[in-house]
Structures are given as C-alpha cells and as structure tokens.
Amino acid sequence: MAAADREGKKLQDVVFSIGMAAQQAAAQYGADRVVNATVGCYAGEDGKIACLPLVEKLYRALPIRDFVAYAPPLGLDSYGRAVQEEVFADRRPDLYCETVATAGGTGALHIAVANYAERGERVLVADWRWAVYDSVCEEVGRKVRTFTLLREDGTFHQEAFAEAVHELLQTQDSLVIILNTPAHNPTGFALTYDDWRAVMDVCGEEEKKGKRLSLVVDIAYIAYSGEPHEVRRFMELFKGAGEHLLIMIAFSMSKGYTLYGQRTGALVGLSSSRAVIDEFRELGKYSARTAWSNVNRAAMTLLTNIRRDKTLTAELEAERRAFFDTIMRRAAMFTKEARATGLPMIPYTAGFFISLPHAAPMQVCRRLQARRIFALPVHGGIRLGICSIPERQLPGLAAAIQATATEDR
Ligand SMILES: Cc1ncc(COP(=O)(O)O)c(C=O)c1O
C-alpha cells in the first residue's frame, strides 16, 4: 500500500530492542543482577529514571489550561527569549537571532535538515554519532557523509573535518554540518576552543568562496557538560560569521529539564543578515505548523517561569550540578577500572555516555548479554549509558567488558 518512495522504510531502533531485553532480564533475575547500560536518561542511585525536583514541583503546579491550550507554531514569545538566554547565557554573539519551538531536539534537527540541505545532497556528520541523524536525513531525502571525529590521540580531527567540508563543496553549492558538542553522544567528547576556531575558519573560507553553509550545533547535553560559562565559550566565535554562514543551535528540554517525553525543544538561528534570519523564522514556522502544529505549552511555560526568576534559575542549576557530579563520579570510577584492566576507551570529558572502541561491537554486546550486561553497539564501538548505571554496579564492569571484548582475539 505504501507510496513508492516510502516502501521498505524500517527504523532500526537498537536502543529500544536491547533495552527491552534488559528489562526482561531484570524481571527474570532481579534488577540488581542486571546492568542496563542502554538507557539515555539520567537515573539516580536507585536505578530509576529521575526528574529534577524543581521541575517536578513547578510542572505539577501549573494550571490545567497550560496543558490543554494550543500555542503558536513558533512557540510562546517568552519561551523564545528564555531559550536564547539559556542557550547563550553570557556568551551571546552580536548577531540577528530567532527561535522556533520544536518537538524536542529531534524536531530542531528535522527543521534544520529539511530547510537547509538540498534534496539528494549530503549532510556532514561525525563517524561517532547519534544514529538518528542518519534517519532524520533519509526521511527527507538527504544522505549523510561522515568524517573521522578523532585523531589517534583522541583529539578532534581538524584535518579530516576540513577535508570533508572542502570535498563536499566541490560538488555541492551548500552544506549542512551537524556537530554534537559538548558532552557528545556517544563518546562524552567535546571540541576545544581551538577546535572551534578551526571549524569556523574552514566554514568561513568556503563562505568567502560563495558557498552557503549551515552549521547545526546539537547541544542536547550541555546542561551536564561542566561550568556553564566555560562550556559556552565557543559561542563567541560565531560573531565573525559571514552572511552565508547560518548557525543553528538545536536545543532540547529532554535532558536539561528531565522532560524527555514532553517533547519540547527549539532551533535557534543566528546570522549576520537580517534577511537570512527573517527567512529562517518563516521556514521554521511553516515546518512546525505542518509537522506538529505547535509544541507542549506547559513545558514552554515551565522553562519561561524558571528563567525569569533568578532564584529558581539558581535552584535549577544547583540540582543539575548534583546530577552532573553523580555522572562524573560514575564515569571516574569506570575510567579508573578501564585503565587498570587495559580496556580502551574514547577520551571522556562529560556527558551521558562513554564509548569503547571495538571492531565487532554487535558481537561483543551479544556476548555481554550472557553476563547480564546490556550495552549498545554503535558505529565504531560500544556505548555505555553511564548516566543511568548506579555506582554499586560499577565495580567489575570494565573488567567484565574487557574479558568479553578480548575473548576471541
Ligand atoms: C545527540 C542527541 N541530540 C539530540 C537529541 C534529542 O533529543 P530529544 O528529541 O528528546 O530532545 C538526543 C536524544 O537522545 C541526542 O542524543
């Protein structure tokens, strides 16, 4: 029955299928005897998904009309302003700026790709990446081209990035680039200020040649990536962007507000051209209206209420800090044991995930299941959701993975 160009489309959602297997194992053997490292949501030491206490309190207290009323396709104006404050903090570049409310960070990526990548052309993403990027591109008839994210020493592969941009722009007049940083999924890696300078130089060079570039910065995990002022330092570098270099920031309330299922985020556009930003707003409004019409008004109100009150903002920051500290403690425990056992690991700075490079990740993940350890195979290795593994399950985990990973070598 399907239309010709839709036939055979099938989502390969390994996260959910392995997650289901982990849940079945937990039901059979008891949750304490199963390590479920597939989850991409923060869990407390009780192993259960957690909500930031302030978010829970304020969200439950909102009047029912905030949950039932429609919102404008672009989102509430106050939300747009509050999102910009959160995204940039005190690192706001002096550029024209507009916000489109979206159905999570995923919706933001959809709007960026659908409106700025030409049909049939390539979108540049890193080899270590969130697999959903590929589907978002394919859904609207675009493809991905990958570049090698990391050099041998674990630093950002500036040369590979530059080469991929130049190569693609020999055959394309425009290019959409997606960079997920800081607290990259799946590795916990982050570009340094110097890496960002290199990225902006490469993009600027092509822009001067008359190419159109759209740089999408996916900051889904920024709330748990370190000191807010410091982790936003790279945003200052956007100020020099030429007229045909559009910066788009994909913002999400899923992690930063622990509202994963409430589907609220935003795409923030930045440009030195008023005309480019006016167009961004119109395109965003059109895409939003036709894809989901408008997003969760209650979540937008919640964010606005917190951001317009300094005390609440400080309270939220403190609660996030506590989650962040827990994740960092878990990551440090795992890293220490990985080093001691010789388990190779992608350098981790911060974030929900740790990645272990391996040539046959699917095979290792299958074998790990026999030890009741459920991890996710990704391109290039194995992803562990350190955000959700309680500390008591960490001793021995790196050693078990190392033993499994080297079984056949
Ligand atoms: C790298 C990355 N970007 C964006 C998102 C967007 O999430 P959401 O659509 O829930 O806001 C996620 C969620 O897992 C992610 O891992």
Image: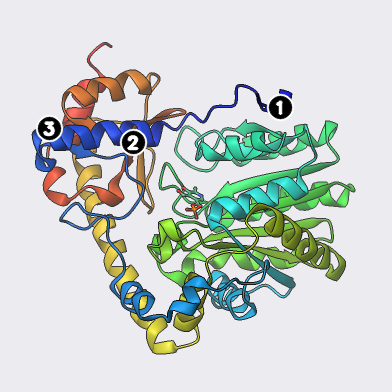
Question: Is disc 1 placed on a helix, strand or loop?
Answer: loop
Taking the spot 62% from the left edge, 56% from the top edge, the residue there is 292
Hey, which residue is sitting farthest top in the picture? 408
Question: Is disc 2 placed on a helix, strand or loop?
Answer: loop
The disc placed on residue 345 is 2
Marks 2 and 1, Cα distance to the nearest angstrom?
44 Å
Q: From the viewer's perspective, is residue 22 above or below residue 347?
A: above
Kindly identify which residue carries mark 1: 3
Asked if one can make out residue 241 in the rendered structure from this viewpoint, the answer is no
Residue 342: name its quadrant. top left
Kindly identify which residue carries mark 3: 28
Residue 154 appears left or right of 32: right
Q: Amino acid at mark 2?
A: Met
Residue 110 appears left or right of 206: left
Residue 52 appears left or right of 300: left
Asked if one can make out residue 40 in the rendered structure from this viewpoint, the answer is yes
- Quadrant (top left/top right/bottom left/bottom right) for the N terminus: top right
Q: Amino acid at mark 3?
A: Gln
Q: Nearer the viewer, mark 2 or mark 1?
A: 1
| Residue sitting nearer the eye, 66 or 264 | 66
Percent x, y of residue 6:
67, 28
Q: Amino acid at mark 1?
A: Ala
Residue 339 appears left or right of 91: left
Q: From the viewer's perspective, is residue 11 above or below residue 97?
A: above
Q: Residues within 10 Å of mark 1 (few under 14, many from 20)?
A: few
Percent x, y of residue 175:
76, 43
Percent x, y of residue 51:
30, 65
